[in-house]
Amino acid sequence: MPGVLIQNAASHRIDEIYQYILKQWGVEQAEVYITGLFAAFAKVTTHEVLSRPVPAEFGVEGFFFRYEKHFVYWRYLSDGNIGIVTILHERMHQIGRFKGDFA
């Protein structure tokens, strides 16, 4: 079974999400959300989350799924593992925000 690797842009976004939730709702809620996010990453490898291909007009190859208020973008890496590319809040403009993260 493939492993899951958190790529740089996704790692940065996870930190931002944690800090935002921490400030808004406290440490317990921040930990619950991030723990659930990582559980969702693991479900990619077992196909327990519904992932869709990134639309062709974005010009990148990969997939995405929704986790609560965020979209998680991922792709297969050359070694067969899953790379979590980036995570965007539902209100973020999708095309312009992540294209460089797939580079």
Image: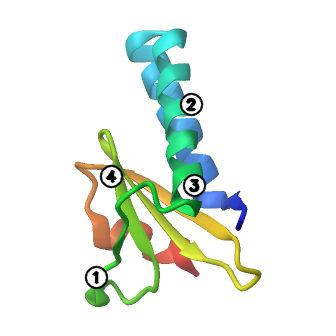
Q: Position of residue 34 (x, y in %)?
A: 53, 32
Q: CA distance from mark 1 to mark 4?
A: 15 Å
- Amino acid type, label 1: Pro
Q: Position of residue 49 (x, y in %)?
A: 41, 55
- Could you say which disc has been placed on residue 10 in the image? 3
Outermost residue toward the right in this view: 79
For the point 25% across and 61% down, which residue is it? 93
- Could you say which disc has been placed on residue 55 in the image? 1
Q: Nearer the viewer, residue 89 or 78?
A: 78
The answer to whether the residue labelled 4 contacts the one labelled 3, judged by CB atoms less than 8 Å apart, is: no
Q: Tell me the element at label 3.
A: helix
Q: Tell me the element at label 2.
A: helix
For the point 70% across and 71% down, which residue is it? 81
- Tell me which label, 3 or 1, sits earlier in the chain: 3
Q: CA distance from mark 4 to mark 3?
A: 14 Å
Q: CA distance from mark 2 to mark 1?
A: 28 Å
Question: Quick check: 78 left or right of 26?
Answer: right
| Mark in front: 3 vs 2 | 2
The answer to whether the residue labelled 3 contacts the one labelled 2, judged by CB atoms less than 8 Å apart, is: no
For the point 59% across and 37% down, which residue is it? 15
Q: CA distance from mark 4 to mark 2?
A: 15 Å
Q: Nearer the viewer, residue 80 or 62?
A: 80
Query: Which residue is labeled 4 in the image?
Result: 66
- Could you say which disc has been placed on residue 29 in the image? none
- Amino acid type, label 4: Arg
- Amino acid type, label 3: Ala
| Mark in front: 2 vs 1 | 2
Q: Is residue 58 above or below residue 73?
A: below
Query: Which residue is labeled 2 in the image?
Result: 35
- Amino acid type, label 2: Thr
Q: Is residue 69 above or below residue 75?
A: above
